[in-house]
Image (spheres, rainbow, N blue to C red):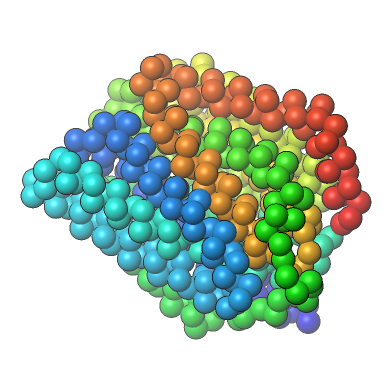
Amino acid sequence: MANPVRQAKGLLFFALFNSIVGFSILFPILAPLSRSLGLSEVEVGCVATSYSLMQFLGSPYFGKLSERVGRKPVLLLGVFGFAISFGTFGVVARMGEAGLLEHATLFGLLIGARMLGGFLSSATFPAAQAYIADLTERDERVSGMALVGAAFGLGMIFGPVIGALLSRFGLLVPIWTSMVLALINGCFIALVLPTTSRKPGPAHAHVEGVLRRTLPILFIMFVTVLASVAMEQTIAFLYQDTLRLDARSTARQVGLAMGIYGVAAVLAQGYVVRRLKWSPPSLMRIGVLIGIVGFAGLVVAQNYTFLSLAMAVQGFGYGLAMPGLSALLSVSVDDSEQGEVAGFGSSTQALGRTIGPLLGTSLYRLNPRYPYAFALLMLAAVMSVLMLGSHWRRLSGATTHAE
């Protein structure tokens, strides 16, 4: 049984890695592309927010759906939906470049394409996390969720670097590449990834009960993601404005920096989490503390080396905290509720990604360093809850013993 399980984990890792490569290819080019299309920073935030808003709405539905129809069909819907939406986004952006659309029309169509992509792609990660829960025992859940996180981090290494290299041939080339990768990945999942058997449990999972047991964890997850996204959405602007780069130089420099960020996250998730086997609460506390140091660096950094080092530190901290949160969520519910709680977790992260871009870009307009000072304060608040909150200590302690 061990070999088929290990093989299934490896195949899922590869599928998720492909998905994240396709998604993160766009990171270095979205800011310069949006500026070349005449969008303001706040309009860029609205485009990003529309994607995350639909993920917030769709994730619980698809998580629950995976309990009924299985993990693999929902994964396929997410990956192929991603491909369709990115193709649509590329066509609209090309029409904007050619001057065929008025500004308001262009902005509205970009929003529509991202909303479509956000809703359909929200199926991917709840199904993937539930798939991992099907394959692992409860005491192996941290390691299993770290595998998902490592796929994310490794994709974050290669995606931005590939996007930066492809941007030399045009800012839309990474978008077409992302669409093609998603189509290939969907075919791979359909033909190779095995189905899983969902574990038996209570006949009916009650939404209210799941939320009541996991709400403190979901709150910590929301604030952690919100702080990170406020950085992610504005970091290309910070590099461009601090270092006085043109659009294509920004894409290349930010692509390399995001690759460094991804290396740090993979090191945390692929080695530290899986080898040292710390408890979920310990991972969260240490990860948040390291993240605070990283954001402090971004507040004061004035050159490429310092900016990229601060990003790497923040990425390492995030890579420790998120597997701890995901594992704590998973072991807080019954085996029959894994799809539902994975949906809530993905929805919570999407809520942070919905608010984060608008908040980050709005703060950036006030002062380029405000998004990172805000993120630092948010993580400091999380740290105080983790260390001092009596309800949180009881919850994390009880969950850790349950493992």
In the rendered image, the quadrant that contains the N terminus is: bottom right
Q: Is residue 125 visible to the viewer in this orientation of the structure?
A: no
Percent x, y of residue 31: 32, 37
Q: Is residue 136 above or below residue 253?
A: below
Q: Residue at x 54, y 23 (%)?
A: 374
Q: Residue at x 25, y 42 (%)?
A: 33
| Side of 159 relative to 352 (left or right) | left
| Side of 349 relative to 339 (left or right) | left
Asked whether 204 or 243 is in front, the reply is 204
- Locate residue 382: give its quadrant: top right
Percent x, y of residue 115: 36, 53
Asked whether 12 or 164 is in front, the reply is 12
In the rendered image, the quadrant that contains the C terminus is: bottom right
Q: Is residue 84 above or below residue 330?
A: below
Q: Residue at x 32, y 31 (%)?
A: 42
Number of marks in picture: 0
Q: Is residue 177 above or below residue 283?
A: below
Percent x, y of residue 17: 52, 61
Asked whether 69 or 125 is in front, the reply is 69
Q: Residue at x 74, y 55 (%)?
A: 209
Q: Is residue 112 above or below residue 335?
A: above
Q: Is residue 84 visible to the viewer in this orientation of the structure?
A: yes
- Locate residue 292: give its quadrant: top right
Percent x, y of residue 23: 42, 54
Looking at this rendering, what residue extends furthest in the right direction? 401
